[in-house]
Image: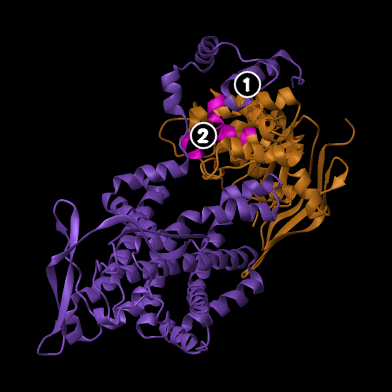
Amino acid sequence: MPSNDSPDNEQIKEQTDRIVPSLAESPEPMRSTQDTRAERQMLTGLSAKAAKSLSSKTPTQLAWRKLRKNRLAVLSLAILIVMYLTAFFGQFIAPYDYTSQDITSSFRAPVTIHWTPWPIVYDQTSHFDQYHFMIYTDDRSKPHRLLFFVHGTPYKFLDLFPTDLHLFGIAGNDKVYLLGTDQFGRDYFSRILYASQISLSVGLIGISLTLIFGLLVGGISGYYGGWIDDLIMRLCEVIMSVPDFYLLLALAAALPPTLNPLEVYILIIAMLSLIGFAGMARIIRGMVLSVREREYVEAARALGVSNFKIITRHIIPSTYTFSIVTATLAIPGFILAEASLSFLGLGIRDPMASWGNMLSAAEDLSSLEQHTWLLIPGFLIFITTLTFNFLGDGLRDALDPKSR
Amino acid sequence: MDEPLLSVKNLVTQFATDDGLVKAVDDVSFAINEGESLGVVGESGSGKSVTALSIMRLVAKPGRIVSGSISFSGQDLAKASDKKMRDLRGNDIGMIFQEPMTSLDPLYTVGYQIREAVELHQGLHGDVARIAAIKALSDVGIPNPGERVDSYPHQLSGGMRQRVMIAIALSCNPRLLIADEPTTALDVTIQARILDLLISLQRSRSMALMLITHNLGIVAEVCDRVIVMYKGKIVEAKSVDELFKNPEHPYTRSLLNSIPRLDSPLKTPLPTVDWDDS
C-alpha cells in the first residue's frame, strides 16, 4: 500500500482541490481559470458541458421535476400557496376587524364594484320588504372610490408590529363590504380572512404534531420491538377503536366554557392530533419494521454506526417520502374536523371566526336562499380539501421511487 | 507470523425458531493469517454467511452465538462489548455484502456514505473527509471520482455500486475484509473485474480476505486456502491447490463434479451435488 506522501496521493489531492470548488482556499493557490479547465477536461475526459449535465440531482430535485409535470398538482400547490399567503397577511388584507359590527348593516349583499375606470362602490340605502328582510339598494348619488393602502383600524401585524395600514378601503365612516355582511353586520370578507388563519393553520399545526408523535412513537415501537412494541401498539389500537368523531365530541364537550378562544384553539389542535397520531404511529412502525431489515441498515451496522445514528440517519429518513404524502393527504381531515366541531358549536366560538362556525350561519335554508354568500366558507373548505388531495396524489407519484 | 489474525474456535451459532433450534454454525474452527485470503464455499444454507455475521457479531435475533471463541488479534470478539464491536466494525474488519443494489442508502450521496465511515473511525471532517472519500473512490477504479462522490446510488450501475461498497469497506484500511458473495448479483464480465480489483487491493494493502462464495471458480482464482462448509460444519479445509487436486470429502468431490466442464461429453446431464450425510 502506498504511504500517504507518495506522488500518487499528491496527485489525487491536487485533482480533488481543483475539482472541488469548496477547496479553493487550499494551500496551493488556484491557477488561471483557463489552465484549470483544460486540466479538468483532461482529467475527467469530459468537456465542461458534459461535466455539467453529469452533475448530480438530489432525490428532491428529481421529485420536484416529476411533480412539475403533474399540472393538477402544480395548480393545487399554487392555489394553496395563494390561500396560505392570503391568510398570513390576513390582517393587512382585511379592511376591518373580525369583531367590528354595524347592527344597521345586517345581511348586506356583496357590493358591486363599478370600474370607471377607477374602481368605485356606491353607498347603499336600506328598507324592509314585505317579509321583513332588509333590502339594500345602491345609492347612485353617493359613489366611493376604492382606495388602496388606507389607514384604518389599528392592529398588530403578526402580533408584533403595530400598524393601521390596510390593503384597501374607502374614505370616511362608510364601509365597503366586499363579500357582504353577516347577521350582526360584520364584514364577511374580513371574517373569512381571519377564519382562514385558524382553519388553515389547524391543518398544518395538527399534522405537524401528529407527525412528530407518530414518527417518535412508531419509530421506537418498530425499532425496539418486543414488549415495548406490544404495549404501544395495543394502546394505539384502543385509541383507534373508539369512533373518532364521538371521541372528539366528548373531548370538546368537556372543555370548560371559561377558556379563552386561544386556549380553545390550542386544545382543539391537541385533541385532533391525539386522535390522529395512533394511525400514523402504526403505519410508521410498519415502515420502520421493513426498513430496519434493509441491507443498507445492515451495512451501516457492519460499519460500526451506532443504533441512534442508524435510526435518525437511515431509518427515519427512509420514511420521509411516505410521511410527506400521508401528511398532505391527512391535512384536509384536520380542517374538516375543526369545521365540523365549530359548526356544531363545540370548536372555535363566536366572536372568533373559523370557516366551520361561519358555516353554521348557513344551516337555515330559508336564510341561505336570501343570503347565498354565507356559503363562501363552505366553498373554501371544499377547495382546500380538494387541492390538498390533488397535491397529495401528485406528491405520491413524484416521490414513488419505483416510478423513477 | 505465529499468531493468526483471526482464529475461530468451536464456534456454535444457533437460531431459536418456532420449529426448534437450528444449528446454523455447528462447531466451526478455522484461522486466517495476516494478508492471507481464505475462501469459504458451500451451498446455500451451509452456514457461510452466518459464520461471517458471527465474526462481526451481527447475527440477527432470534440467532445468537452459543459457544466458542472468535479471537481477532488477541481479543475475543464473542465476548467483546457492543461499544468495542462498533469500534472494530468498519475500522479493523470491513464487510462487503451480496446485494450492491440495496446495500447503499438511496437517500445519500456515495460520498456521504464513505464519509460516514471515515468520520466515525478516523475522526476526519469536512474537506479532509471529502478528499478521503474521493481517494477511496479512485482506489477502487471509479472514473471521475471528484464528480462521482456527489452521485446518488440510483445514478450508478450495479458494478459501480459494488465498487462503492468496496470503497466504503476499505476506507478505514481494515486488516480483515469479509466479502459475502461480492459478485453473485453482478453479471459475469463485471464479476471478473470486481474480483481482479479485490485481489489487487488485497495484495497491495496486505489485508486478510475472507471470501464467501459458492463459486469454486472464484476460489481457484482468488484464494490461498479454502474451507468447505456443509450443514453448518467444515467438511474440508486445505490449500486451494490441494483441494482441486485431491478432494477428500465426498461432498467436496460431489461439489467439484457438479462444475460444468468443457471436455465433458455433449448432451449428458450435469451431475448434481448428491452427497448427503443424513
Q: Amino acid at mark 2?
A: Ser
Query: With B104 as the anchor, is A345 left or right in this view?
Result: left
Q: Secondary structure at mark 1?
A: helix
Q: Chain of mark 2?
A: B
Query: With A54 as the anchor, is B27 left or right in this view?
Result: right
Q: Position of residue B165 (x, y in %)?
A: 60, 37
**Helix, strand or loop for the magenta stretch, by majority:** helix
Which quarter of the image is occupied by the C terminus of chain B?
bottom right
Quarter of image, res B121: top right
Is A348 situated above or below B78? below
Find chain A in the image and tell me its colour: purple
Please tell me the numbered disc located at residue B151: 2
Is A367 situated above or below A42? below
Task: Give the camera-side residue of A103 and B276.
Answer: A103
Query: With A360 as the anchor, is A318 left or right in this view?
Result: right
Report the chain shown in orange.
B
Residue positioned 51% across, 38% down in the render? B153
Q: Which residue is mark 1?
A: A17
Task: Give the camera-side residue of B261 and A369.
Answer: A369
Q: Position of residue A365 (x, y in %)?
A: 19, 85
Magenta stretch contains residue B202 = no
Mark in the foreground, 2 or 1: 1
Q: Chain of mark 1?
A: A
Q: Position of residue A13 (x, y in %)?
A: 66, 20
Mark 2 crowdedness (10 Å alpha carbons): few <14, some 14-19, many ≥20:
many
Q: Secondary structure at mark 2?
A: loop
Task: Give the camera-side residue of A266 and B63.
Answer: A266
- The residue range painted magenta reads B145-167
Residue positioned 72% across, 22% down in the render? B204
Magenta stretch contains residue B148 = yes
Alpha carbon of mark 2 to alpha carbon of mark 1: how far?
A: 18 Å
